[in-house]
Image (spheres, helix red, strand yellow):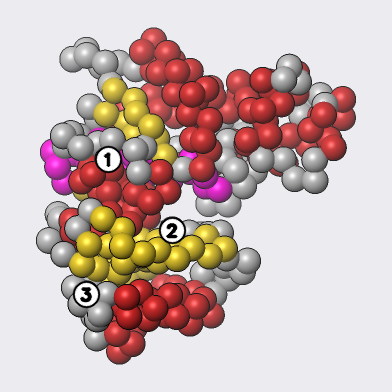
Amino acid sequence: MSYIAIDLGGSHAACALVDGSTIIAKQNFEISDNKSLRGLLPRVEDSVRDLLHQSNDHCNGIAFSFCGIVDAVQGRIIQTNGRYYDAPLMDLREWATSRFALPLRIENDARTALLGEWVAGAARGFDDVVMIVLGSGVGGAAMIGGRLLRGKHGQAGCLLGHFSCELAGRLCSCGNVGCVEAEASSSVIDGICRQHPQYEGSALVDLQHVRFKDVFAYADAGDECARSIRERSLRVWAAAAVSWIHAYDPEVVVFGGGVMSAAEDILPAITEYVDRHAWTPWGKVTLRNAALGNEASLFAGPALFNGHP
């Protein structure tokens, strides 16, 4: 089937024309102000119209991936945690019908990433999967027996970044303390570096804004501050992975998101920790890097439109 895929994050958006498992055309743009979804939609509409023109208006619908808690059955955004404050007030199905005469399916972006990897990526062939997205936040999704885990309120399985990993840790934007997202995500890494006792003597102090790729590069170069922060981040993700495995009993855990550009350092460390600490008497959980990268959510359309449970 041919469809328009919209993947809306906190700092980026992608719109694509997808035919089956092939991306025909794609447009990316950065988001400088994620306060209002209504204010952003005209820009999205321009991309969709351009893509529809390229499809010769042959399109089955719009698959919308959103960075918040979503009620996929009702097609509504429930909660955004400070971003796109007006999104829960909007009827995106009506928007798609009135603007483009197309049906719309909407789902949490981590769940669509899982569906994409399940259909065409690293989770293909598995029906018990946990997907972890390490980026500006920490997202997640779970599939059990080939069915997405959603829950009555749309929260089941998609709040993996808000599992507590540090009881005396940092205050998270969700209101909890010591969340994985508050302790080791791209949005907080600069602040974590600046609060580190070795920061002033580190080469990181010369950077205007520290990113994870800087931490890993400086750690490889022998910077003690960067090395300490890298090791702590790896422990946070690894300990969290064990909790997610105990909670959802997956055969495979797929890691995606921008942080996984350092997968060659991250996956071996997490795998070693999981093999030692996860209680899985049946065998070892497989840990994989996402095969589809930041395009995974764009491949979820067929599953969403075919009524994936």
Residue 279, position as x, y percentages in the image? 30, 16
The correct choice, above or below, for 234 with respect to 105 in the image is: above
Picture residue at 51% right of the left edge, 43% below the top: 258
For residue 98, side relative to residue 282 (left or right): right
Q: Secondary structure at mark 3?
A: loop
Residue 264, position as x, y percentages in the image? 49, 24
Q: Secondary structure at mark 2?
A: loop
Residue 3, position as x, y percentages in the image? 24, 68
Q: Nearer the viewer, residue 86 or 48?
A: 48
Please provide the residue range marked out in magenta.
129-147
- CA gap between label 2 and label 3 equals 24 Å
Residue 269, position as x, y percentages in the image? 48, 18
Q: Which residue is mark 3?
A: 59
Q: Quadrant location of the N terminus?
A: bottom left
Find residue 122 and report its image quarter.
top left
Picture residue at 48% right of the left edge, 29% below the top: 263
- CA gap between label 2 and label 1 equals 21 Å
CB atoms of marks 3 and 1 within 8 Å? no
The disc at residue 121 is 1
